[in-house]
Amino acid sequence: MKFDSSSRNDDSTTLIRTDAGKSAPSGGDETPSDRMAVHVVWEIGLLLLAGGVLFALTQSSGGPFAEGSWSGLFAALAPVIMLASAMAVSLRVGAVNLAVGPIALLAAWMFTDASGSGSAMALGVGLGVAAFVGIVLATLTAWLRAPGWAASGAVGGAIGLWAGSAGDPSAFMLAELPNTAVLAALGGAIGVSLFLGLVGAFSGVRARLAPIRETPSGERHGRGGLVFFGVLLSSTLAGAAGVVAAWTAVPDGGAAALPDPILLTVVALGAALVGGTSLMGRRGGVCGTVFASALVLGLMWLAEGRGWSFDPSWIALGAIVAGFLVTRLVEVMNVADETETASTRRAGSLADLREDDPPGDRERSDLDATGEYDEDFAGLGSGDPWTNTGGFRTTGGIPKQTANADPFGASGVFDDLRDSPRDGYGSPRHGR
């Protein structure tokens, strides 16, 4: 099994065809650096919004926050951040993983069913099945080059059909995670999200993701390995989120506390988009996924606590619509102007030195580069006025007179002087 990989010709000297039908080098100068300032400003705004919502949540007298306080919020926030990070990773590699919710459900089911064999075995089974599904999904997207939404939709549908016929798992046999373990899970989720955001902020990483973004679906882009790794990592994170969600929920009478796969997918996609990850791929922030996850979950809890007259799930759906606007903002603000792009591409070019030359010299040098002057000088050595007239010959385009050449032979004006006899002083002699 082979994946798309960069060939030896994919370097800075390889020529690719541009929109104008010409050839241009495929180096990094075709992809100008993104402006990270737009992500910094947006993430500061998200931090303020999330802080305001959490403060309003503490003032609520009902709802899940009043029942579970901060420990309950942290236990619910950890899997949401993991799922949002999983969705963001898949978006960055251009293969959106819409199966993060079903994969979390499958991992939670397997973890709960294997809980009677101990925590280590249950963790291995839950994360192992998520990794296996990730390999299958990554193979579909990286090897068969199927669009991410189609491949993940098929995998998610298959998991949903299986869950409908599999019934309930065995009784949950493990104790609920203590608060210290919940804080550790939340810290790990935040750390993974920030680490992935920092890695994605490097210009070299974004440059390697650029061909995935610019290549139509189904065509070879030479980054199959990155797509495979990104989809596999996304599925594994989704499985970890399902395990944490099942372990932190309090089972009622031993019944399994399985998450809702559709709601988890909607929340994850909304939080990833609002956090600044672009739907077009490659672009994204650093802390935006964490702040957006806290904002979306906080708004859902606030709506339930205040008794608003609509289902809190609509907030997650509204986050997706708002994420479309955020994607548009990120794409527009990341486009470098023509002057900056031109200066970036021409930096270090010898052609920039000609801009200081006088206009006449610059025009002449431009014509020399096109070959028009060379053709004219070449014509001087082959044209009729010089080659076959008066015994002249050319060397390098400059006419030279050969031996015994007659400079007046072409005109015929001085034929009488040339043909008449001459005396020793060069004067014509008549009458002889």
Image (spheres, rainbow, N blue to C red):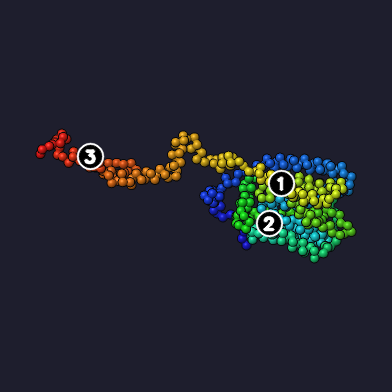
Q: CA distance from mark 3 to mark 2?
A: 88 Å
Residue marked by disc 3: 413
Residue 105, image x and y in percent? 78, 58
Q: Residue at x 77, y 40 (%)?
A: 48
* Farthest-out residue, bottom: 165
The amino acid on which the numbered mark 1 sits, given as a three-letter code, is: Leu
Q: Earlier in the sequence, mark 3 or mark 1?
A: 1
Query: In the drawing, does residue 324 fall left or right of residue 27?
Result: right
Q: Is residue 406 visible to the viewer in this orientation of the structure?
A: no
Instruction: Tell me the tag on residue 148.
Output: 2
Q: Contact, CB < 8 Å: mark 2 with mark 1? A: no
Question: Where does the N terminus fall, quadrant-wise?
Answer: bottom right
Task: Identify the mark nearer the N-term, 3 or 2.
Answer: 2
Instruction: Residue 171 in the image: state x and y as whole percent.
Output: 85, 61
Report the mark closest to the observer, 2 or 1: 1
Position of residue 322 in the picture relative to residue 405 (left or right): right
Q: Secondary structure at mark 2?
A: helix
Quadrant (top left/top right/bottom left/bottom right) for the C terminus = top left
Residue type indicated by callout 3 = Val
Question: Which residue shows up at 86% across the image and 59% down it?
Answer: 255
* Residue 335 position in % (x across, y down): 63, 43
Q: Nearer the viewer, residue 98 or 376?
A: 376
Query: In this figure, which residue is indicated by the disc labeled 1?
Result: 325
3 or 2: mark nearer the eye:
3
Using a 10 Å C-alpha cutoff, classify the residue at mark 1 as few (fewer than 14 neighbours), some (14 to 19) or many (20 or more). Answer: some
